[in-house]
Amino acid sequence: MRVDLSPRDIHYGSLIEVNGKHGLPRDYDCAMFRVEDGSEVTMQRNAAVLLGKLLEATGGREIALVSGYRSAEEQRRIWDDSLRENGREFTKKYVAAPFHSEHQTGLAIDLGLKKGHIDFIRPKFPYDGVCGEFRRRAADFGFVERYPKGKEDITGIAHEPWHFRYVGVPHAEIMNAKGFTLEEYLLWIRKFRFGGSPLIFRRDSLRAEIFFLEAYSARIELTEPYSISGNNADGFIITQITQNREKNYEIRHT
């Protein structure tokens, strides 16, 4: 199957890096879908579907969806409110500036334990009980804890045990196995160049080949199923599924 890519496409996909160094285009836009948990929270389609399945598999009735997709205007309001109420030092640790927030991508979700008051900025999401079970199963559905303790210098954000990010399968499982943040994973994956030797992932009936392709206008040949994600900087991550009977996730061209 022929696939056309352009430099504009680097800003879209489940593996885009959004942080203080890499912002979103001012006209960034993706369709959002409601997570099926009875809330008003929306995310990108695959993220919404897989989060719903993950919550169903891990006792989601005890977990609150605190914040999913946010528009640029909402992120600006949250940033300004936190500056006024908490000061600049706190805000830079826990709140991303507009166009530098993962919440604007529709790929991020803040979660809280349904118990008493839930802090919107720093909800409680401990490492035991139902929250611990959610963490244990998250990678199976394509989610990772985005800002782990000890990685603050890499992510630029303080430890946030409540903030999860959809990156897709098998990337979430590889990141967990390697102990990588998204920043570290995207840097590492660059050595597996398209046309050369891929990164090969195997688990049960799933086999995937993963490549990095530098950004330029190109037409490439791929066999379905596959996924393509930009990195929001200078290239694409191509994931080719060569064997798969798994039902926990979807592979789509992004």
Image (spheres, rainbow, N blue to C red):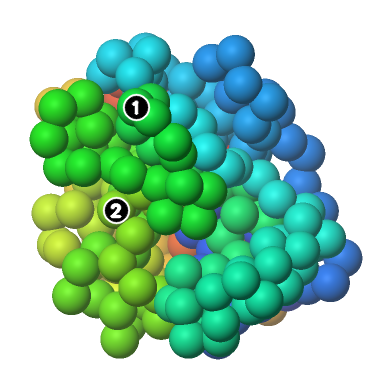
Q: Secondary structure at mark 2?
A: strand
Residue at x-position 30% and y-position 79%: 152
Q: Classify the position of the N terminus by image quarter.
A: top right
Q: 171 above or below 81?
A: above
Rendered image quadrant of residue 212: bottom left
**Separation (CA) of disc 1 from disc 2:** 16 Å
The earlier-in-sequence mark between 1 and 2 is: 1
Q: Is residue 55 left or right of residue 161?
A: right
Residue at x-position 64% and y-position 38%: 44
Which of 166/228 is in front?
166
Which residue is under mark 1?
115
Q: Secondary structure at mark 1?
A: loop
Q: Is residue 113 left or right of residue 71?
A: left
Tell me, yes or no, if residue 227 can be seen here: no
Residue at x-position 62% and y-position 21%: 39
Which residue is under mark 2?
161
Residue type for callout 1? Lys
Q: Residues within 10 Å of mark 1 (few under 14, many from 20)?
A: few
